Image (cartoon, rainbow, N blue to C red):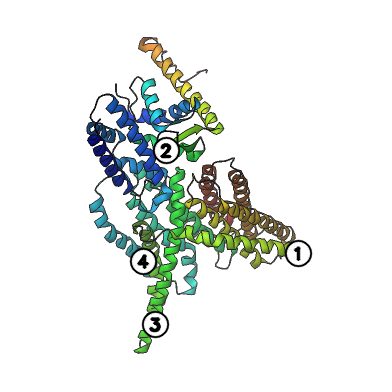
């Protein structure tokens, strides 16, 4: 299944913030996690994750630090901030609304859909 | 994995790194971060049984095209090289043919601007004639900025919707400047003369951003552009002054009087063309010159901070308050505008991710001092208004000081938070770029509402 570019772009921020809410991480690990969580359906171009991470850093949603483990390379780790957690909560609310709406539409099915009410005397 | 293939891989990665380093959009830490990612990907693929060269190819491919990647980095870090961005319209297109057309088109717009300024003469409105002076005073901003907006509309290939917005706003400006019955010696016409160009400059901003005027980054680019444009325009004006002096001097040496030509053609038409040429220079220069506005900001921020502190000390020492003379108040207003400019250009050139440093503390001191001075100025203006009543000038001054006060106080608050490590720098950027709307609104209010409000006096 191919997921369109728009959807990938729209879901990128909540996904990254959501993953970072679990604990600090770095680019490659975040990407792997997205891939696993989506069962391989959400395929990001690897490099494009970084401009997004930098944007979140500039906005103050995440903080970044360079760390050098005992054995291994210097690596840039990202950690979510309090502000980022608030942003995540806000995005969750918005996505929940979208998902609920879609579910409502799809569960109703074509035959069950209410007939459009006349333009007068509409309540609610 | 053999030693050989390992060497090969290192060589390939080194080549990739060198290739990446040629991109000015990517700074060293970004390149490092991406390389780390590349190595992780290669390690995973080789662990899955691929040869290192295959793994390298796949990893590079998965990273995405370097063009696209650079463009995304440029979008995010536009402070790094905003001047070279080719974020016009669709972004790719046919850059070479457009570059070739760029110079002639710019010249066409500049000539158009110069000629348009002389068109009213055909209808007997000559600006050297004192009776008609008002026409040019009112319409000065329109003449200077409409060609500039048109130039950017062409350059950015803006949509018809944006063109509609631009045309509508310029038409509104034209109506406001010409439909009101304001006499030459009124305060309202002077206020229109000052505020219409400001209002229209922000309309040029809509064209500059190519319709993406809601984006913080594009607005910040426009602020950067404004500073650079101003510097280029001043340089062109200086050059023009030299040219003028030579023209007058050499022609008078051979017994010809060139002053009419200079006064009626060279200076006004040159100034109009200069507006477009300066804009083109800002866009076209290829890192030949570093951005000047931030450099000047660095030099003058400490000097202005010291001056303001001394001034404030003197006011307190002499306990004079600010003299309520009109000219003095204007100087203080201009001073506050300069402080705001220093603040804006320091912000525009700052790496948003950098930690707060000494310069930021200096900036905070500057803002706080300016804030105190603004309060003193406001007290003086309020004093004048209670004494002499509201006039167009005083009301405009009051409004401007309140607009500045709001900006400076919130800036001070954000700066304090930033210096103490509580707030990210992005907040400050966001605040300043959003605030452009307030300037635009205020300038339009003065242009549109003040003349009827004060009976065109």
Host chain of mark 4: B
On screen, B160 above or below A2? below
Label 1 to label 3: alpha-carbon separation: 51 Å
Respond whether the residues carrying marks 1 and 4 are from the same subunit: yes
Between residue B133 and residue B356, name the one nearer to us.
B356
Label annotation for residue B288: none
Place of residue B437 in the rendered image (x, y in percent of width and height, measured from the top left): 52, 47
Tell me what residue is drawn at x 36 percent, y 10 percent.
A111
Number of the front mark, 2 or 4: 2
Near mark 4 (Cα within 10 A), the count class, few <14, some 14-19 or many ≥20, is many
Do we see residue A66 in this rendering? yes
For mark 2, give the secondary structure.
Answer: loop
Number of the front mark, 1 or 3: 1
Please give the residue where the numbered disc 3 appears in the rendered image. Answer: B248
Marks 1 and 3, the one that precedes in the sequence: 3
Label 4 to label 3: alpha-carbon separation: 20 Å
Label 2 to label 1: alpha-carbon separation: 56 Å
Number of the front mark, 2 or 1: 2
Place of residue B199 in the rendered image (x, y in percent of width and height, measured from the top left): 49, 54
Number of the front mark, 4 or 3: 3
Respond whether the residues carrying marks 2 and 1 are from the same subunit: no
Please give the residue where the numbered disc 2 appears in the rendered image. Answer: A74
Label annotation for residue B114: 4
Near mark 3 (Cα within 10 A), the count class, few <14, some 14-19 or many ≥20, is some
């Amino acid at each position: 299944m191919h997921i369109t570019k728009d959807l990938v772009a729209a879901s990128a921020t909540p996904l990254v913030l959501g993953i970072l809410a679990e604990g600090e991480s770095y680019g490659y690990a975040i990407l792997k996690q997205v891939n696993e969580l989506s069962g391989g359906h959400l395929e990001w171009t690897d490099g494009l994750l970084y401009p997004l991470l930098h944007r979140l850093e500039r906005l103050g949603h995440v903080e970044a630090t360079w760390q050098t483990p005992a054995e291994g390379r210097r690596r840039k780790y990202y950690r979510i901030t309090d502000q980022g957690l608030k942003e995540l909560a806000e995005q969750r609310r918005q996505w929940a609304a979208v998902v609920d709406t879609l579910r409502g539409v799809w569960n109703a099915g074509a035959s069950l859909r209410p007939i459009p009410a006349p333009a007068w005397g509409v309540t609610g | 994995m053999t030693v050989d293939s390992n060497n090969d891989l290192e060589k390939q990665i080194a080549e990739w790194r060198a290739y990446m380093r040629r991109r000015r959009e990517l700074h060293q830490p970004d390149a490092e971060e991406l390389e780390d990612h590349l190595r992780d990907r290669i390690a995973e693929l080789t662990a899955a049984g691929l040869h290192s060269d295959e793994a390298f190819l796949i990893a590079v491919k998965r990273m995405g095209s370097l063009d696209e990647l650079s463009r995304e980095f440029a979008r995010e870090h536009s402070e790094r090289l905003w001047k070279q961005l080719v974020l016009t319209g669709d972004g790719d297109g046919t850059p070479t043919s457009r570059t070739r057309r760029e110079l002639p088109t710019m010249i066409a717009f500049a000539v158009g601007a110069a000629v348009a300024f002389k068109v009213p003469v055909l209808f007997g409105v000559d600006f050297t004639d004192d009776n008609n002076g008002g026409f040019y005073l009112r319409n000065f901003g329109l003449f200077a900025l409409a060609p500039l907006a048109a130039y950017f509309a062409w350059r950015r290939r803006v949509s018809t919707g944006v063109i509609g917005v631009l045309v509508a706003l310029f038409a509104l400006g034209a109506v406001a400047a010409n439909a009101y019955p304001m006499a030459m010696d009124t305060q309202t016409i002077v206020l229109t003369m000052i505020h219409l160009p400001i209002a229209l400059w922000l309309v040029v901003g809509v064209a500059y951003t190519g319709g993406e005027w809601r984006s913080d980054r594009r607005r910040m680019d426009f602020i950067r552009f404004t500073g650079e444009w101003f510097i280029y325009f001043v340089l062109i004006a200086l050059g023009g002054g030299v040219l003028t002096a030579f023209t007058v001097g050499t022609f008078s040496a051979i017994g010809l009087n060139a002053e009419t030509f200079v006064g009626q053609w060279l200076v006004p038409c040159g100034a109009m063309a200069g507006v477009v040429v300066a804009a083109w220079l800002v866009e076209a220069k290829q890192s030949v010159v570093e951005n000047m506005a931030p450099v000047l900001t660095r030099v003058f921020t400490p000097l202005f901070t010291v001056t303001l502190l001394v001034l404030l000390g003197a006011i307190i020492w002499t306990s004079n308050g600010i003299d309520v003379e009109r000219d003095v108040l204007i100087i203080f207003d201009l001073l506050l505008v300069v402080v705001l400019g220093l603040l804006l250009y320091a912000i525009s050139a700052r790496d948003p991710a950098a930690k707060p440093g000494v310069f930021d503390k200096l900036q905070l001191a500057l803002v706080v001092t300016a804030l105190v001075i603004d309060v003193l100025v406001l007290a003086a203006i309020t004093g004048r208004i209670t004494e002499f009543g509201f006039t167009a000038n005083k009301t405009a001054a009051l409004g401007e000081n309140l607009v500045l006060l709001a900006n400076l106080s919130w800036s001070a608050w954000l700066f304090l938070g930033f210096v103490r490590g509580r707030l990210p720098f992005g907040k400050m950027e966001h605040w300043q770029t959003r605030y452009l709307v307030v300037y635009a609104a205020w300038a339009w209010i003065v242009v549109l509402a003040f003349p009827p409000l004060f009976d065109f006096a």
